[in-house]
């Protein structure tokens, strides 16, 4: 893409807009917002990339991409990233790129959309961009992002800059104390950081004698800075006449207010400061948790007003107010995102429950009971009881590797695929072969599924149950009857689902007698650790719990309560799913 002009590089001062804030700190995007990717660092400077609502854009080095990033390092794939606007939210989806895409330092999982928020840092190979949005149709318009390249002025005489030590607010003139109180109300009532910065600049210009001011961010590795807000008392003046010193930023980043005054003597001034006839400048760091996340810069020149003697103290107080508001806005946005995430997770949990059979019931002569408890909000476990037209019943229980939303999506996909395959055929070996290939072809991140699946045939009589089954790397199941410890039958087993697309699954057989039950469970049962000893619940303890049970419902209830008691918490380490299946008693039908 063509490069962008960087402003007058002859000066020693420059301004821009890169607050470096986490994506949750900026104002939320609305359905009317366009989005900009503002260059932060990369092989070559470039113009901001503007994407319109409703668009879908491919970013990569291929000639057919909507945004082409061509570097010599080979860090960008041909089709690297997709950005689209969906339901008023901007989403980024990594297209299985070789080197990955990152949002605020976190890798974006392939094919899983990540929400872009104002201020977020999007890294695509060796390129980095800040996420920015234009004003909505009904929003207050703010200045578009402007980038300027700073110069390294560290060789200038240090006497040019002066650190300003803390001074009591009591020394402020009474009218500036009143202005500070008014400014405090404006800053704290701001809806976003841009409004707060504008309120802070307005207070400084109206009360201190400074003529122009900007709310800026720290310089990037390439010396680029960005501006979030700019005001001037000179009609028509814009950022083209303002410069910012890299040395001034560096000194202010240590947490101290830094100023340039005419008392330093013209001989000690940097060249651009002399050319611009600046007689006073002030740089105020905006601090959160000990780090500068932005700066208020102010200056006055030539015959413009001399600044007040207590301008530095006033500016320090305004900077603290702005820092507190920035922290509050961050916390508020985090709370909003937490609520949104909670709502989404609850909706996902409800959707998962819709895929599950009832907690207990009788299906085709088979009685069962089950319980699923997610380790978090959504589970990666799956379970099904499906009656077939020929009288048999298919039962399956599986566990998707990993945790969180990705595992939950894989769980739903696997469960739906099995249900769809059962409509076409009832050979569990063929079903597993096709499922294995389906998962392996789509699980580029190494995700896999362990599973037990069986065909239970009660047609030959009620005294015994023929079970044709496949254990695909699951291993967590027992045969039990009242008065005896549950035990694992002898079986061969197969490879887990999703590792080798060419693996061939082979079914095995067992017989279930009247009064015997097949108890299936996920690894969340046996791998649950004691908070005191860190010992796992284990398979032997599981068998002992089942010894005293006499029905599927007792198997499930007592095993659940035993694991929860062992964990000393309702919040378990992992998803826990338990199902007990046997020949239905007449009273159950």
Image: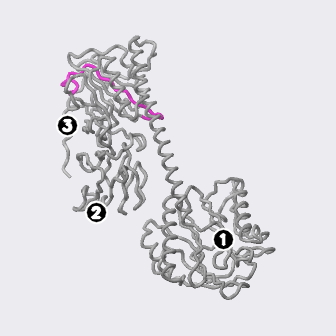
- Residue 280 forms part of the magenta stretch: yes
Please, what secondary structure does the residue beneath circle 2 have?
A: loop
Q: Nearer the viewer, residue 486 or 159?
A: 486
What whole-number distance in Å separates the C-alpha atoms at marks 1 and 2? 53 Å
Of tags 1 and 3, which is closer to the observer?
A: 1
Residue at mark 2: 78
Residue identifier under label 3? 7
* Quadrant in which residue 109 is drawn: bottom left
Measured Cα–Cα span from mark 1 to mark 3 = 74 Å
Q: Residue at x 21, y 40 (%)?
A: 6
The magenta segment: 271-291
Kindly indicate the quadrant of the structure image that contains residue 227. top left
Is the residue marked by circle 2 packed among few (<14), some (14-19), or many (20+) residues within 10 Å? Answer: many
Query: Quick check: 294 above or below 342?
Result: above
Which numbered disc flags the more N-terminal residue, 1 or 2? 2
Q: Is residue 332 magenta?
A: no
- Give the residue displayed 48% in from the left and 68% down from the top: 413
Using the image, determine if residue 564 lies above or below residue 399.
above
Work out whether mark 3 precedes mark 2 in sequence or the reverse, and give the earlier one.
3
Q: Position of residue 226 (x, y in %)?
A: 30, 37
Q: Residue at x 28, y 56 (%)?
A: 57
**What secondary structure is found at the residue carrying circle 3?**
loop
Vertical placement of 79 versus 239: above or below? Answer: below
Q: Nearer the viewer, mark 1 or mark 2?
A: 1
Helix, strand or loop for disc 1: strand
Label 3 near label 1: C-beta < 8 Å?
no
Q: Which mark is residue 361?
A: 1
Q: Residues within 10 Å of mark 1 (few under 14, many from 20)?
A: some
Looking at the image, residue 377 sits to the left or right of residue 213; the answer is right
Q: Residues within 10 Å of mark 3 (few under 14, many from 20)?
A: some
């Amino acid at each position: 893409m063509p490069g962008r002009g960087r402003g007058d590089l002859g000066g020693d001062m420059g301004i821009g807009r890169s607050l470096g804030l986490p994506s949750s700190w900026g104002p939320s995007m609305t359905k009317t917002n366009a989005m900009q990717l503002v260059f932060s660092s990369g092989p070559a400077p470039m113009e901001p990339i503007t994407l319109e609502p409703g668009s879908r854009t491919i970013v990569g080095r291929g000639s057919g991409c909507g945004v082409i990033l061509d570097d010599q390092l080979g860090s960008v794939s041909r089709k690297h990233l997709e950005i689209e606007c969906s339901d008023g939210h901007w989403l980024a989806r990594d297209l299985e790129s070789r080197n990955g895409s990152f949002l605020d330092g976190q890798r974006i999982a392939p094919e899983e959309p990540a929400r872009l928020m104002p201020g977020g840092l999007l890294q695509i190979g060796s390129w980095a961009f800040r996420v920015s949005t234009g004003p909505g149709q009904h929003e207050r318009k703010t200045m578009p992002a402007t980038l300027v390249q700073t110069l390294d002025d560290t060789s200038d005489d240090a006497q040019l800059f002066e650190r300003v030590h803390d001074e009591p607010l009591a020394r402020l003139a009474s009218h500036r104390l009143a202005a500070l109180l008014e400014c405090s109300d404006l800053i704290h009532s701001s809806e976003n950081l841009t409004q707060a910065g504008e309120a802070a600049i307005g207070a400084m210009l109206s009360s201190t004698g400074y003529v122009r001011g900007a709310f800026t961010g720290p310089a990037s590795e390439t010396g680029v800075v960005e501006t979030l807000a700019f005001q001037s008392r000179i009609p028509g003046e814009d950022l083209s006449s303002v410069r910012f010193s890299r040395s001034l930023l560096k000194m202010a980043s240590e947490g101290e207010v830094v100023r340039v005054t005419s008392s330093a003597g013209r001989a000690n001034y940097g060249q651009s400061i002399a050319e611009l006839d600046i007689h006073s400048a002030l740089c105020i760091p905006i601090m959160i948790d000990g780090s500068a996340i932005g700066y208020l810069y102010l200056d006055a020149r030539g015959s413009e007003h001399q600044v007040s003697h207590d301008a530095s103290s006033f500016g320090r107080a305004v900077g603290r107010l702005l820092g507190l508001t920035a922290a509050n806005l961050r916390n508020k946005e985090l709370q909003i995102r937490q609520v949104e995430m909670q709502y989404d997770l609850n909706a996902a949990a409800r959707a998962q429950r819709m895929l599950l059979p009832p907690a207990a019931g009788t299906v085709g002569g088979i009685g069962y009971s089950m319980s699923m408890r997610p380790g978090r909000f959504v589970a990666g476990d799956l379970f099904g009881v499906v009656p077939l037209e020929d009288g048999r019943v298919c039962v399956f229980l599986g566990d998707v590797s990993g945790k969180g939303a990705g595992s939950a999506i894989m769980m739903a996909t696997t469960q739906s695929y099995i249900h769809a395959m059962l409509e076409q055929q009832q050979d569990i070996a063929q079903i597993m072969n096709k499922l294995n290939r389906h998962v392996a072809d789509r699980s580029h991140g190494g995700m896999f599924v362990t599973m037990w699946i069986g065909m239970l045939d009660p047609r030959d009589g009620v005294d015994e149950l023929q079970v044709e089954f496949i254990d695909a790397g699951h291993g967590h199941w027992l045969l039990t009857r009242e008065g005896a410890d549950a035990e694992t039958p002898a079986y061969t087993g197969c490879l887990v689902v999703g590792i080798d697309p060419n693996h061939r699954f082979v079914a095995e057989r067992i017989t279930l007698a009247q009064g015997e039950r097949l108890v299936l469970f996920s690894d969340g049962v046996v791998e649950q650790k004691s908070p005191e000893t860190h010992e796992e619940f284990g398979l032997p303890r599981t068998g002992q719990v089942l010894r005293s049970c006499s029905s599927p419902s007792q198997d499930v209830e007592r095993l659940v309560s035993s694991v929860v008691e062992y964990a000393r918490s309702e919040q378990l380490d992992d998803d826990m799913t338990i199902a007990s299946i046997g020949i239905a008693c007449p009273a159950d039908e």
